[in-house]
Amino acid sequence: MEAQQVIDKIMADARAEAEKIKKQAAEAQAAEQAKFDEELAEFERETQAMAQKAAEDERSHLLAGARMQAAREYLAEKAGILDEVFAQVGKKVDELPEADYRELMAKLMVEAVETGDEQVVAGTNESRVDDKLVADVNQRLEGQGKGNLTLAEDRHGLRGGFVLRRGRIRTNVSVDVLVTQARNDLVMELARDLFSQEADGGQP
């Protein structure tokens, strides 16, 4: 399987989980609205003397607050589910067949290189980021005039992946950093979807 296909599959699984979360949030919001409609019906019976506009304003305020609270609670609750999902994502990356893993690391290295004379610092127990992989990346970078990467003798305490080092500049392309970034991006996307629905009055 191509490295890009692996990444696409991982992100597709995560996005499917996000869609499931959004659906659950919408159902919870609908139930919350029904509950508040019942309470507001009682409220409106008790406040018949109030002006119609005041009653509508109160109703809108209560419903908006309820929807916002439901969105916050579901986002917090499902963040735990996403933690588990992305823990599995990291595990799947670690357990990729060697050829697929090397290809993924090579493509990430090509994308992360800036000057082309960086040192590649592998993880402490990372055996798949080696001289052979660095040579492969250098060959891919030749056309850009950047094929001067070298494998550092020292190692970094990474679970997997690598760090590109040039002087004091470090670019961390470890598996943990990649997974965390993908998770944070998905949480932000989920939050935008949930709260944009609230801004639209709960309409999908």
Image (cartoon, rainbow, N blue to C red):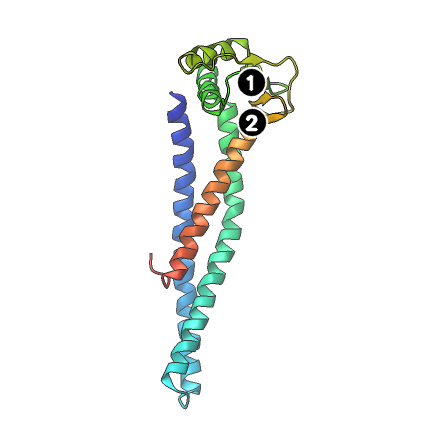
Q: Residue furthest bottom?
A: 49
- Residue 122 rendering spot, x and y as whole percentages: 59, 18
Q: What crowding class fits label 1: few (fewer than 14 Cα within 10 Å), some (14-19), or many (20 or more)?
A: many
Question: Residue 159: which quarter of the image?
Answer: top right
Q: What crowding class fits label 2: few (fewer than 14 Cα within 10 Å), some (14-19), or many (20 or more)?
A: some
Amino acid type at circle 1 is: Glu
Judging by the rendered image, the residue that carries numbered circle 1 is 118
Which residue: 51% across, 8% down? Answer: 132
- Residue 197 rendering spot, x and y as whole percentages: 38, 57
In this orientation, which residue lies closer to the viewer: 104 or 108?
A: 108
> Which quarter shows the N terminus?
top left
Disc 2 or 1, which lies upstream in sequence? 1
In this orientation, which residue lies closer to the viewer: 14 or 132?
A: 132
What kind of element bears circle 1? loop
Q: Is residue 189 above or below residue 4?
A: below
Q: Is residue 190 left or right of residue 129?
A: left
In this orientation, which residue lies closer to the viewer: 28 or 139?
A: 139
Amino acid type at circle 2 is: Thr
Question: Residue 3: which quarter of the image?
Answer: top left
Q: Is residue 137 above or below residue 69?
A: above
Judging by the rendered image, the residue that carries numbered circle 2 is 171
Whether the residues at callouts 2 and 1 have beta carbons within 8 Å, the answer is yes
- How many angstroms separate mark 2 from mark 1 (CA)? 10 Å
- Residue 177 rendering spot, x and y as whole percentages: 55, 32
- Residue 142 rendering spot, x and y as whole percentages: 43, 11
Which residue: 47% across, 62% down? Answer: 68
What kind of element bears circle 2? strand
Q: Residue furthest left?
A: 204
